[in-house]
Every structure is written in C-alpha cells, then in structure tokens.
Image (tube, grey):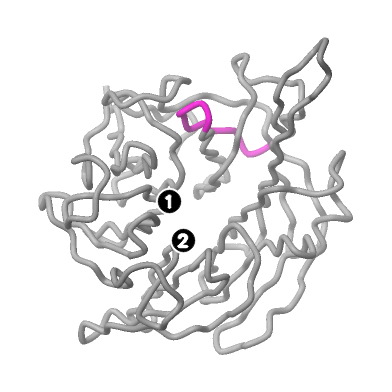
C-alpha cells in the first residue's frame, strides 16, 4: 500500500448492522476481525463467540463459543482477538475475561476448544509467520513469546524499562512484522482534578523493537498535550503494512490514522473525528484488517457492525 493510497469515505456494512443482538445477522460489540480469503472472522465480544461471515450473506456462522458467558472449554468470555492459523486449520482466540488463549479447530464442526495459554493478563495478542504467539504482559510490562507447543512463555523484552513518563500503562497492544520486529502500542488516560484547570488527557505511543539488535525506536509520541487535529488520541488497535506504514485506531474520536514508517507524517484515512452511526462515521472502533484487495475493514464496535472502506482508485 502506498502512503498516498486513499479509501472511499462512505463504508459498506459487510457484517452486522442490524442493531445490537445475538442473532446470526447481528453483533454485540465486535472487538477484532481477521480476514482469511473470502471469510471474515469476528471476535463478537458481547455475544461471547467467534462468528464467521462471507461478504454477500447476511447471516454468519458461529465457529467458536456461542454457549453463553463462561469458562468451560466450549465457552468464551468477551473474546478480544481472533487469528486464523492456516497450518492446522484452527483459530487462536484471546479469551480476555478468562485470561487465556485457546486453540479452536475449524475441522469437523468442533464444539470446544483447547486452552494453550492460561493466566495471561494482557489486552491483546498477535502471531508471527512461524506460529509463535506474542502478548504484552500488563502484570510485569514485558513482551512474552510462546513458540508453537510451548506452555511457558519466554520474556523477549522489557517494556517498562524503555517507557517514558509512565509509572504504569492501562493498555498495551502489539504487532509483529515478517522480520519479527515488534511494534508496541502503549496508552493511558487520566483526569486532572485541579478545580481551576480540570481536563482529561490521553497518552498514546508506538515504539518499535528490532529483533536483530534488540533496540527500541520511538515511532509515534503523542504525549499528553500534543494533539492530532486538536484531539488527543486514544489508540486501541495497531496494524503495520508491508511498507511499514502504521495504522492506529483512535477509538474515542471514531477514526483510523495512518503514520509514515518513521512517524513523521500522520493522516486520518477514515472516520469523521466524532463518533456516529452514518456510513462515513465510526463509533468507538476497535480492530482493523485489510482484505486481499487492500480494502480496509473496521470493527465498528458501538455500532455493532463491520465496515468496509474500499480503495478509492479515482
């Protein structure tokens, strides 16, 4: 994707859009999406399930969970991430409120999953091309990696030692590229209780950790006072394309922002900067993904729908 690529500003709804609900054509706070060929896999958090859609069919198919909120092996509790592992035709699911990662086979209509990582306190996971799983461990502020088949994760870098300004982070997420470099997103929100100057501020950062030399490179430094288009950024999801351009979901402001590789140039690519329910608006968006044509898919959480922003070729 070239940095000057643009997307049409009015999106097409490809899943959900029929209000909050648990029917097969409805979603309830979708948090993440994964595109695999023609299929759209959705972490339908409020319905405690993973549901799969094809773009031309209104009804989805439940492929994991859907048995109510719970911690049994056939249940999920607010799944936050879903990844397709093509090596064994399975789903990797971060089951957030159960603090576990599950592998759920897509073969033979499997009705239960397998816990592969337990007692994990994080806000999201990612997977590299070799099938290793990474998580930003918020209990110790480290990045852990689980190679396929491992039960105990290995600490590969300490985030806390390289963090600025913060004593702790309320939220963190990561992305791993094909070179196994990690992009780490950190976010915190606080309220100033000064009666003479009361305000709420956000700090959002993206740093890159390079595998070859183990160095940290600051990419995006939003800070508490620096604003993007006069709005503080609440970054809740992160994606990096093949040219190392960085895409961040700014949930509070209903938009997606793209930065250049070095973070020097940032542009709003979709969303109006305010939350809303029109075709050109988003409402507390969360996950993002690209399909094979470069169309941008957004999990429009509070509108309970998945929006497709098509590439504008004009």
Q: Which residue lies furthest to the left in this view?
A: 57
Q: Mark 1 points at which residue?
A: 31
Closer to the camera, 204 or 259? 204
Q: Image height check: is 64 above or below 159?
A: below
Q: Looking at the image, tell me whether mark 2 or mark 1 is earlier in sequence order.
A: 1
Say left or right for 106 vs 285: left
Q: Image height check: is 146 above or below 275?
A: below
Q: In which quarter of the image is residue 104?
A: bottom left
Q: What stretch is highlighted in magenta?
A: 252-262
Q: Can you give x and y, in whole percent of width and height, for residue 286 in the image? A: 46, 44
Closer to the camera, 37 or 135? 135
Q: Can you give x and y, in whole percent of width and height, for residue 119 in the image? A: 63, 76
Q: What element carries label 1?
A: strand
Q: Quadrant of residue 40?
A: bottom left
At 13% from the left and 55% from the top, the residue drawn is 59
Q: Can you give x and y, in whole percent of width and height, for residue 127 in the image? A: 53, 68
Graded by Cα atoms within 10 Å as few (under 14), some (14 to 19) or many (20 or more), the crowding at tag 2 reads many
Q: Mark 2 points at which residue?
A: 81
Q: Is residue 260 magenta?
A: yes
Labels 2 & 1 near each other (Cβ < 8 A):
yes
């Amino acid at each position: 994707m070239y940095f000057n690529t643009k997307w049409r500003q009015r999106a097409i709804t490809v899943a959900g859009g029929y209000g909050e609900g648990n029917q097969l054509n409805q979603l309830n706070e979708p948090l993440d999406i994964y595109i695999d060929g023609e299929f759209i896999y959705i972490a339908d958090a409020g319905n405690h399930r993973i549901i799969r859609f094809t773009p031309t069919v209104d009804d989805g198919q439940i492929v994991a969970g859907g048995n109510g909120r719970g911690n049994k092996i056939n249940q999920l509790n607010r799944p936050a991430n879903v990844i397709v592992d093509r090596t064994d035709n399975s789903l990797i699911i971060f089951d957030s409120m159960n603090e576990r990662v599950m592998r759920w086979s897509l073969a033979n209509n499997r009705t239960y999953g397998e816990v592969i990582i337990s007692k994990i306190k994080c806000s999201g996971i990612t997977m590299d091309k070799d099938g290793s799983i990474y998580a930003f461990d918020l209990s110790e502020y480290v990045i852990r990696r689980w190679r396929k088949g491992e039960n105990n994760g290995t600490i590969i870098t300490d985030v806390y030692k390289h963090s600025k300004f913060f004593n702790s982070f309320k939220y963190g997420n990561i992305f791993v590229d094909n070179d196994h470099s990690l992009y780490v997103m950190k976010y915190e929100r606080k309220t100033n209780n000064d009666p003479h100057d009361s305000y709420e501020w956000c700090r959002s950062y993206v740093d890159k950790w390079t595998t070859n030399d183990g160095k940290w490179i600051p990419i995006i430094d939003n800070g508490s006072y620096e604003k993007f288009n006069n709005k503080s950024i609440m970054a809740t999801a992160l994606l990096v394309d093949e040219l190392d351009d960085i895409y961040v979901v700014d949930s509070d402001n209903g938009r997606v922002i793209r930065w250049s590789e070095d973070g020097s140039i940032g542009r709003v690519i979709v969303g109006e900067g305010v939350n809303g329910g029109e075709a050109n608006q988003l409402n507390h968006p969360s996950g993002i993904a690209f399909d094979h044509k470069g169309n941008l898919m957004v999990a429009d959480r509070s509108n309970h729908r998945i929006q497709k922003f098509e590439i504008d070729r004009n």
